[in-house]
Image (tube, rainbow, N blue to C red):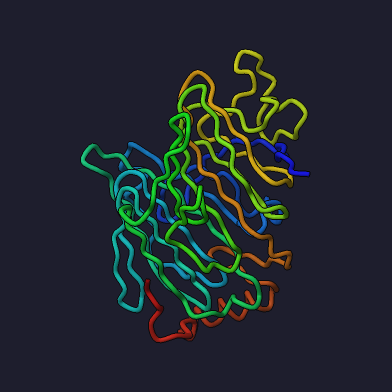
Amino acid sequence: MSETRKIKTVSESRPTIEGAGVHLRRAFGYYQVPRFDPFLLLDDFRSDDPAKFLPGFPWHPHRGIETITYVIEGDVEHGDSLGNRGDITRGDVQWMSAGSGIIHQEMPGGDASGRMGGFQLWANLPASHKMMEPRYRDVKSGRIPEVSLPGGVRVKVICGEVEGVRGPVRDIVIEPEYLDVSVPARAGFTHPVKRGHTALAYVIGGRGYFDDERDSFSHEVVGKNYFDLERECACGDGTLVLYEDGDRVSVSAGEEPLRFLLVSGKPIGEPVAWYGPIVMNTREELRVAFDEYRNGTFIKHPKPARE
């Protein structure tokens, strides 16, 4: 019998500083492994203070993961040690499979009003793909379809499928889905999610309810007291919802419009050895990676593929 997913945990993103001094909010990261398998980290770098994002993320390595950067305001300039250059702006996505190794930098820039907005998601790679050839998928906003659903719901399909419309990012090993969902006030959204896949929602605007019962009281709450009757347990901006297993998610907006990211993927179920920007399966593999980075043999392929 088809089953709507229940909420497993509810948590709030927390302030942190990364790179050369970028102030951001972390929805989850190192200490939650393997709770969100196959996902490792979700950072929210929305800001209207250039001093808090312009320092950026200077040259650093990645190995063993995929980084997915989605920009909703401003732009992010990208460059790597092999001469690749790029710039992703409002509505664009860069899906980078670091694989065997990339050394790159990411430098955020605000829009005309000094605002910056975006998210970076890290997805793990299984052992069989950790040393794959690096690959970029630069996806401009015009290639990302937007699906209109009953009730005025709109869904941008970065990866996955909604009502027969597929997103431009395909053939990813963890079978991910990445949707940007906007729900008008008092409207609802129901979407199938593969049973056995990890599913999470991150609120980026408004307030909403993330299960059929509109009730979070019976679920594990991480880092925040949700016993607030006036808000009826509605999840607001910066709230992360992790789902239990099931066949679909059901979300509804309250008295104001709701916008959230819906992400799902197939768990890998392998050991995770993680230090900084490199994620492998064993501590020995980490040691080798950092030794190679220090001695100049980190890059294994002459030039990563770009799509």
Measured as percent of width and height from the top left, residue 293 is found at: 50, 78
Figure disc tally: 0
Decide if residue 129 is on the left or right side of residue 156: right
Q: In the image, what residue occupies the spot 46% across and 34% down?
A: 153
Dividing the picture into quarters, in which one does residue 248 lie? top right
Residue 280, relative to residue 32: is it above or below? below
Q: In the image, what residue occupies the spot 37% across and 49% down?
A: 71
Q: In the image, what residue occupies the spot 46% across and 37% down?
A: 149
Measured as percent of width and height from the top left, residue 108 is found at: 33, 52
Quadrant the C terminus occupies: bottom left
Quadrant the N terminus occupies: top right
Measured as percent of width and height from the top left, residue 244 is found at: 73, 44
Decide if residue 73 is on the left or right side of residue 199: left
Residue 263, relative to residue 267: is it above or below? above
User: Which one is in front, 300 or 160?
Assistant: 160
Decide if residue 5 is on the left or right side of residue 71: right
User: Which one is in front, 166 or 87?
Assistant: 166
Q: Residue furthest top?
A: 230
Decide if residue 51 is on the left or right side of residue 293: left
User: Which one is in front, 50 or 119?
Assistant: 119
User: Which one is in front, 104 or 184?
Assistant: 184
Q: In the image, what residue occupies the spot 45% across and 48% down?
A: 119
Measured as percent of width and height from the top left, residue 9 is found at: 70, 38
